[in-house]
Image (spheres, rainbow, N blue to C red):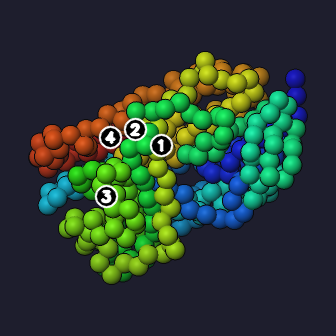
Amino acid sequence: MPIESVAVLGGGLAGASAALRLARAGIGVDLFERQSGPHHKVCGEFLSVEAQRDLRDMAFEPLRLGAVPIDRVRIVSGRKSAESRLPFTALGVSREVLDEALLDAAAAAGARVLRGTRVTAIEDGGLRTSAGRFPAKTLFLATGKHDLRGMNRPDGGERSRHIAFKMHWKIPARQDEELGHAVELVLFDGGYLGLQRVAERVMNLCVLVRRERFGGSWTDLLAELMREDHVARRLDGALEMLDRPASIAGLPYGYLHHPADDRPGLFRLGDQAGLTAPLTGDGMAIALRSAALAVDCLRAGRSSASYSGLLRREIAGQVRKAMLLHQLAALPVLPIAMGLLRFWPPLLGRLAAATRLA
């Protein structure tokens, strides 16, 4: 049976790449994006080797967007640090730039991209939006970390215990050179943060912090983070590039969608299908993988429940390993772990390889 059209809800990584794949397959696509223009999202902006493969499978080259190669990982806790070469070359790239480029590619391929259009409800046979009602039988739910009313993900173990922030910084040339091609993970009491370059002299800082450690404002949190010597050194001479940080709270880290909860014709993509802990940097890979698998299943005539089962089997191992490391990072065993990593730095590379998607 031919597929008449698909409504994609959300223009982030999962939604935009799904729309691009659908349009190139000759399937009608309406993509609804609530933001009217380019915007930042809370994200570590670490494009893993699996994510790059799925982008290049669409003939989409992230290096053309100014992405920065990342081939080292550095863990910092207090005055101690450990460093290792990654077993692959990742990329640092701005989500604002990447998502926008994918949306442009989808539109050029024939997808109809409706900017500034908020979906308010999913009804039988269609959608209710801020621009009116749209008929739709097949839906790709790709609203990222934001739940659509009535389609909320079940509670996860970490819901409402953490707040996440992202800020881009313009850094001096000396910091650009010192940070180089490394992703840095700074562990502190109550959370952790990631630092990496996403363009020449542009550094992304993404932090996850428990609510009780959040002082009530970005300024207060930044002052607290600057107590860490490594963070203070990295931000020395740096200038904030965004008017305010992107932020989000109350996320169900570790969530995996179960096929038994499926609504016929509704395919959950990206964070709506599985929300991994940010520690391992594979959220972008899961978004891209889910989009590719959803389109393949739809074209093959598979149901949304069949797709959900396949995706769950692909990503469950990564999500569970990431959650284990996320939980270990907050335990008192951290000094022992740091000692082991300093004694045997290649363990960092092995951990990075072990937490990749299949």
Which of marks 1 and 4 precedes in the sequence? 1
Looking at the image, do the residues carrying marks 4 and 2 touch, with CB atoms under 8 Å apart? yes
The kind of residue on which mark 4 rests is His
Picture layout, residue 328 above or below residue 167: above
Question: What residue did someone put label 4 on?
Answer: 326
Which of marks 2 and 4 precedes in the sequence? 2
CA–CA distance between discs 4 and 1? 14 Å
Question: What residue did someone put label 2 on?
Answer: 158
Picture layout, residue 78 above or below residue 255: below
Looking at the image, do the residues carrying marks 4 and 3 touch, with CB atoms under 8 Å apart? no
Looking at the image, do the residues carrying marks 1 and 2 touch, with CB atoms under 8 Å apart? yes
Task: Tell me the tag on residue 184.
Answer: 3
The kind of residue on which mark 3 rests is Glu
Picture layout, residue 24 above or below residue 232: above
Q: Residues within 10 Å of mark 2 (few under 14, many from 20)?
A: some
Who's the residue at 39% across and 47% down the image?
Answer: 162
Which of marks 2 and 3 precedes in the sequence? 2
The label nearer to you, 4 versus 2, is 2
Q: Secondary structure at mark 2?
A: loop
